[in-house]
Image (cartoon, rainbow, N blue to C red):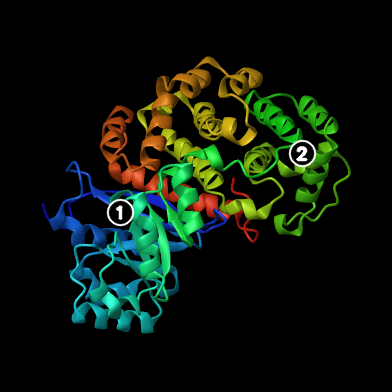
Amino acid sequence: MDAQSEKFFLGRQPILDRNQDIIGFELLFRSADVETARFDSYSQACSTVIKQALDLFGIQDVLGGKIGFINVPLGMFLSELLELLPIEQTALELLEIIELNEQVVERCRELKKLGFTLALDDHVFDGDNTDIYGVVDIIKIDILLTGMEALPTVVRQLRKYPVKLLAEKVETAEQFQVCYDLGFELFQGYFFARPTVLNRRKVDVSQLALLKLLQQLSAEASLEEIELTFKENPGISYNLLKLVNSVSFGLRVKIKSLRHAILQLGFNQLRRWIQLSLFAGNDTGDMDNPLLELAAVRGRMMEGLHKISTFSRSGREQADGAFMVGIVSLLDVLLDIPLEEIVTGLNLSDDLSAALLKREGELGTLLLVAEKLEVADFSSVAGLLDSCGVSLEQLLMVQVEAFSWRYSEYHPDKELSE
């Protein structure tokens, strides 16, 4: 199979700082035709990821302003093709299979002068690597491979050099705490997609009202019913008026009442604002919470997949339901309320409830696609795509559109999407 015809899954895993804020994403890839990424396809896959990021998707859409961490094999590392990437937004990871000889060290110096961030992937300390330790910016330590007992010694050895340490394969709260206490600056692992420690902000009662509004819009409630919910919640009403009166929305009229504000904004815009408000709250710092990132992308991607899948015959209402399933699937963590209680309180339809509680039905299948993709379980994703009637190319387009939408929706200079 030639380089142009082989297809690849694209995954994206967050990299966090000590405050658990996202500073970048590692772009993960795997051939769609084999169980795992083949050694001889690394350069091809790397080229494909770079080409798609630059030509097809746009690096900003994939990364949303964050740093992109890309694994590069030796051939690609020595190639001038790397210089096509946005230098300030790219971290190049040297695969652990690369021999760190003088040629590689010299290439690191060249790329460092250009402004690239350089990292050693899955690195094992070696006293003979002094030269490269003085050049690279980040050293990634696979804590499972290294072993928790050996970590203090490894950290002490590497602290002699001007590098940041990244703890990779962090799977539990205990592992995170050990690495944090040892002084690791950066963290990566599926633990951060598991929301047990990510409930970092207080939730006030207004969020329950937002849930009610979301359900009313989904059920096509009357304007009077929606207006009454706003009237019962002054805090939300105040935020609505601020939103509609914002110059960024281009409105030239002064809002005279809640009903006027709702009509000016429109139900589509109102629904999107509520969905984002549920996760963003008033703390703009939470925009970098990995759980918020996950929720926004999950809902949008499920909506997009529904529209292009064989399920699309059920219409736009069910596509909206797909978005709702995506965000509600994480509300139990955000609100610290059992998911069953949330589903019951929202009076969701049987198909939405089955999707959320049992992963059943069309929407349950889409939710599984999103969940499996988030943990880079590409083999499971492939089988689920077949049942949805969605191709890999379509998945990639929807996936990156969701990344792009999340960024544009949360960016203060962007208008709400339709």
The quadrant in which the C terminus is found is top right
Q: Which mark is residue 250?
A: none
Observer-nearest of 221 and 8: 8
Residue that mark 2 sits on:
262
Observer-nearest of 170 and 398: 170
Percent across and percent down for residue 292 are: 56, 45
Label 1 secondary element: helix
Q: Give the residue type that dot 2 points to.
A: Ile
Camera-near label (2 vs 1) is 1
| 77 to the left or right of 218 | left
Q: Residue furthest left?
A: 1
For image coordinates 37% across by 34% down, the residue present is 369
Quarter of the rendering containing residue 32: top left
Q: Give the residue type that dot 1 points to.
A: Thr
Percent across and percent down for residue 128 are: 23, 75
Percent across and percent down for residue 222 are: 74, 24
> Relative to residue 30, is residue 121 depicted above or below?
below
Observer-nearest of 397 and 315: 397
The answer to whether residue 344 is seen in the rendering is yes
> Relative to residue 227, is residue 252 depicted above or below?
below
Observer-nearest of 257 and 365: 365
For image coordinates 50% across by 26% down, the residue present is 318
Q: Residue furthest right?
A: 256
For image coordinates 40% across by 51% down, the residue present is 13
Residue that mark 1 sits on:
146
Quarter of the rendering containing residue 260: top right
